[in-house]
Image: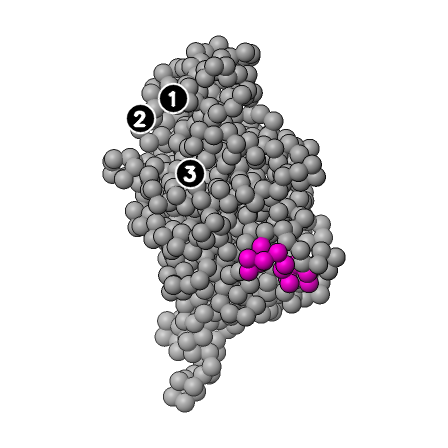
Amino acid sequence: MDSKTVSHLGLGNPEWSGESRIAAVSLPVPMRGKLPPGFAGIATQAQDIAWWPDSQSGRKRAPRRRLMFGLSPDELPREFGLGKPAGPPRGASVVDVRVRIVDEDLMYLAPYQIGEALFRWRDRSLAIRVGVRWKNELHWWQWLRVEELWSGPLVKAVRVGGFIEATPTRAREFRNRRTFFGNPRLHKHDWLFAEVFALCFVNGVVQLSVRHVNNHRFDEGRELGDVAPVIGLVPDRSTRIQEKLDGARTRFGIGSVRLNLDDAAPLVSAKHPGSLRTERNVVIYQPYEGVEVEGGTFRGGRKDGFRVRARDKRMPKGVARTVRFRFSLGDAAPVVSRLVVPEWWYAMCGDLWPGDALPVRDELDGRIDRTYHAVSEDTRGRFDENVVGWAWEGEVPYASLLYYYRSGQMEHWRRAVRDAYHVADIAFDHSTETIRMTDYPFDGSIAPPLFRTVGLTFGYLETGDPYLLECSESAATHWYWIDRHNWPRYAFGRDGASIRSLIFLWDYTGKEDYLTMAREAIGRLIQCQLPDGSYHDQGGTVGIHAMGQVIKKPWMANLATDPVLDYLLRGHDDPALWRAVEKTGEFVMRSFLRGKRRDYWPYEVSYADGNYDPWIHLREPESRGKLPTRWQFAHGHKARLLNVLSRRRAQPRYFGTWLRFYKKHWANAAPSKGDYHVFDKTLQHLPFAQAHRWNARWKNGALHIDPIPCAELRGAIITPAGRIALTIRRERQRYRIVDRVGVSIPVKIGVR
């Protein structure tokens, strides 16, 4: 990327605060071209957290995402540019983080060492203890270790880990050889893992992610009872406080420390409060009423619609909870301003889609906006507050972040980040390292198509919290081996959707092994493609599960094809895979039902190659199980697939068919409320279709357009220089501009 283009990059500070002295952003880095060293005129630290694959960049460890921090002694500007930064501020002091032992007995038969993470800046300090309230006792974490992840002149990142004993161990339980080796608690899970991820700034501000994790070590783990997670805050001077937390007030003084609970506010409400109260010189922060997880009634859950309620005081097997907040040990307020990157920069750095096609606004905007806002957005003040409500879908945070990149509105960023932690804490089963089956009780049920962890990967890119990346990598590799150990088999289908996790991990970690695993899995996928280009629903086993091996659904073929396109669009010109994609495209075109009252793709087209489905008959008796179905479902995938095929084959009929469906069924209709398939694929693939109808690219200060075949095209292209609205028309194998409004820049139109 040339320096002139980079000079157009301005980073907004939309929620400017007069008290903030710290700015932060996760900045995409182009594959080629150097960026200025920092924020112009402001002390800056940059930390690379993602890398382009060497096989694409041609370099070793070329940065792909960069956390950038700016620190000022005065008010921050309302917009930032890149350039030569200022030096570190005067009086900067490193925040020291170390373990302070609170109580220990190392000669005890059940030895213990209770500690706290002491954050010290100059003459002020705050110690953090992570614990649980077990019945009426407070149990704190033990055997702490501090690990410095990275550091620089303005900020350092540390992790602190320890273990919390849920049910206390008594030495008398192991008093002789017989009771020791025969004790049911020996080599059994009876604890929580506790972790703090902290960004420590040299002006005394500390940003924390604190989590309780019911994971596994000695066995696969189990539910823990009579526990309520808490965080102990030990100030440097005595503090008496008794506060009920309902989200209305989020700023408090604890000793010489100022506390900011803005990020944790959505976890509480008047009906589901938390608390801050002093007990034995420790301020006990209860950030949520208790562990509460909705859902499960569809598959034998509780009658009240919950898997666990806060009042139950139970920590389900494999569940975690992350709480984020800030405090300040210095004069600077515990506030960090998040900067906003313009959409065109994400596009040119390959973060919206592979390649550098510029984003576009056109008639699809309304559907995209309505889809995002159709989901439940109420702040519940419960353990499982998330964007779709009942779902644990791993692509939801990714789709939400794409919408944030499009809108630049911080409320959408906050929502997406909360969703990423929701998936990591609940959808990811920490006892088995797998992804739970949606809408099932916590009974170990999984579904291979749901190991979609792109949202976790992107959550990591935005926060730098290694927990999110580790959950993504663990689930993706577990899926790979589950899939590998269930081969050969009769069908694959939407199981292939989880291959996307491996492709995105390769794209952002630069680890080439992930690409090898993805291509191998895609090879298994296309072996199961049917002669007509379709796929069966998914791989099954026997009995009721074998239904997946006889059903054909257009949207399932799209789910199976998504990772194949992800792979191909990232520059891998694989003829076998292109043939598979084109065959699927022809199946999708043949399954389109045309007609005055039709012009849509049915939910299902055949069952065992017949036009009767006994499951559909059971579900909707009035339908008599007749196929193809009258109802339709999840067509966002097709916007990308058919757009790609129109370009590849230079034929407008593919994407034209999708537009025909859109104008009749989606242009003005309200989206399904709270459906994650519609949510994910609409927010991912409609913007792709908008951009790739034009294929507009920025080269040397000019706009170069290579549109897919069409008679006329209207839209507004988002460029580094500003927005330009164009209408182009094809006449005699050439396009000409018939109308333009916006920035005055050269526009060149290619011919196909």
Q: Residues within 10 Å of mark 3 (few under 14, many from 20)?
A: many
Q: What element carries label 2?
A: loop
The location of residue 194, given as percent across then percent down, is 46, 59
Q: Identify the residue under disc 2.
A: 33
Q: Identify the residue under disc 1.
A: 6
Considering only vertical position in the picture, is 319 above or below 718? below
Q: Judge left or right: residue 743 versus residue 143.
A: right
Q: How crowded is mark 1: few (under 14 residues within 10 Å), some or many (20 or more)?
A: some
At label 3, the amino acid type is Phe
Q: Is residue 616 magenta?
A: yes
Q: Identify the residue under disc 3.
A: 201
Q: Is residue 241 magenta?
A: no
Q: Are marks 1 and 2 in contact (CB under 8 Å)?
A: yes
At label 1, the amino acid type is Val
Q: Nearer the viewer, residue 362 or 150?
A: 362
Magenta residues span 606-619
Q: Nearer the viewer, residue 556 or 67?
A: 556
CA distance for labels 2 and 3: 30 Å
Q: Which residue is drawn at the image coordinates 39% and 43% (left, top)? A: 579
Q: Nearer the viewer, residue 738 or 421?
A: 738
At label 2, the amino acid type is Gly
Q: What element carries label 3?
A: strand
